[in-house]
Amino acid sequence: MTMIDAKIQHLCQPKSPGFKSDSTIQLMQGWLETCLGRYQKCTQRGKDSEQFQLPTRLLDIGVLGSRGCRLVLTDSESISGGYLTLSHSWGSSPFLQLNSETMSALTGGILIHELPATFQDAIFIAQQLGIRYMWIDSLCIQQDSKEDWIREASTMRHVYGFATVNIVAGHSEGPEGGLFPSRDLSSVESVVVESKWDDQPEGNYLLWDESALQHDFESATLTQRGWVFQERLLAPRILQFGKIQVYWGCSELFATEAWPQGVRLAAGEPLRFGTDLDALDKTACMEIPPISKWHQGSVNLLSQEPVAVWECLVVQYSKTELTYGEDKLVALSGVAKLFQQTFKDRYLAGMWWSTFPRLLCWRRGWEKGATVRPDYRAPSWSWASIDGPIHFTTLITPIFCTRLLEEYLVEVVDASVMPLGNDEMAQVQGGQVTVKARLHSFKVISQQERRFILEIDGKVQDCGEGSFILDATLQEELEDQQLWIMPARLVVEEMEEELDSNAEGIVLRRKTEIDGEAGSDDIYERIGYLYVPAVEGDRGVELFGLHVEKVDGNTQTGSTLRLRRDTGLLQTVTIV
């Protein structure tokens, strides 16, 4: 609820029932012109001319009123004025795509009305904005050429990052769905309430349903897609078409038709939004704030712990859907390249070298049950090797206790991946990590739903419900297998003068066969994660035979804890 005056009351409603109305078009034009001319954060992004590069192909859609379009190679054309990208659902029905059979027709030129409805609508918007060129994945990447697809997929950081604006067909189920559904504006109507409450300033208040924004923008059908997750992150500006209104986002403004000068919350402050990662926020609850809330303050990626920001991104990305599972790493490679440019780290199938021991501490989420491990697309130690939501236990922040000690128990000696093509940050066909760590004999005695009775180093343990989580279902009976647990992380916390410890470990089994050949005794694959929560004193320490000792500090710092390691018990193993 926002206090208003007559000056802004008229701003809080879309002015026309049609998306193509003059008032809506003028609003979009105004957003873009203001962003390009006045917003410092946005104009600064466009000055990175040393890295600027055009996509290999663009669709020349002509000027306002043009009836035809043609596919052009940018290295043989003089391109000026920028280009627009389109995020859309492919749907399940066949539609016009670039392939060896359609190449000649598309480069020769076709009529715009021969394109699917969503493409036609996007072209209409581009022409209204004075943008002559468009990039649409299905028309600018040759779909029957694996080589072309691999090469072009590796350029998404630049394709979307250097576009003038990205159009998002938020609720369209396929290319024929279009951008402009008929809409009922009553769902975004606001109500003026006159206040005479004793504990509030008297005046008129604007009452509006903030959940409409969530359902129409954040929960749009297309935003649940893996590729679109990256596209919205990389684009400097977006125009998203919902069921009830148009949404604008850039580094300095998040606006809608109902709130063209910026969405206002109860506090009366404009809710800003930006698609560049320089302002990405993180929270301790393993969630990235909704994309519409990334600029609620002067939050800067560089002020956050980079690995935690990456973990938050991965958690959110893992909840999206991909038509082809092998795209798991490819569809996030543009964001990974942006991270690498900023932090100069080595990237290995979704993991970063400098924080590798921490990033090993992922587990499958309970939102969906375990599924069969998909065809190979990443090493078993990478979160990208499985389908479905994943979580990092490292993102859990203590609330009612004080963390005294956090130790990662795996020493990474070496790691490598084998890319499928020339892009080391995209699809891989192999990879391994060599570590020094302790291994403990591990067997499953019995299980009942999410509760497991385990045997660790010959001792039977009931580790509680949900403590042992398989990454994927196994073809063999779990009780029949010899497994190993590799301690990965130890946390000791204090609450009400009592010390509790939780221990985490990666569950391994020997890799008996590698590429059709016999495996080795020191080569393993990951199959799950063990989490022993801090609810039973030192049990987490005792479980893995660890030793924590108190170290006396000075009068100001008090006592601290440290882990005493027995390096003689470490083994060198390789995980693939």
Image (spheres, rainbow, N blue to C red):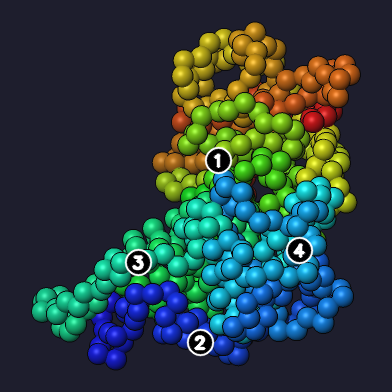
Report which residue position mark 1 lands on: 389
Identify the secondary structure beneath mark 1: loop
Circle 4 packing at 10 Å, graded few (<14), some (14-19), many (20+), is few
* Residue type, mark 1 in image: Pro
Whether the residues at callouts 1 and 3 have beta carbons within 8 Å, the answer is: no
How many numbered marks are there? Answer: 4
Q: Earlier in the sequence, mark 2 or mark 4?
A: 2
Q: Which residue is at 60% across, 84% downward? A: 64
Using the numbered discs, state the Cα–Cα distance from disc 2 to disc 4 in whole angstroms. Answer: 36 Å
Report which residue position mark 2 lands on: 30
Identify the secondary structure beneath mark 2: helix
Mark toward the viewer: 2 or 4: 4
Tag of residue 183: 3
Q: Quadrant of the C terminus?
A: top right
* Residue type, mark 3 in image: Arg
Tag of residue 105: 4
Q: Earlier in the sequence, mark 2 or mark 1?
A: 2
Tag of residue 565: none
Q: Quadrant of the N terminus?
A: bottom left
Q: Earlier in the sequence, mark 3 or mark 2?
A: 2
Q: Is residue 469 visible?
A: yes
Where's residue 49, x and y in %? 79, 80
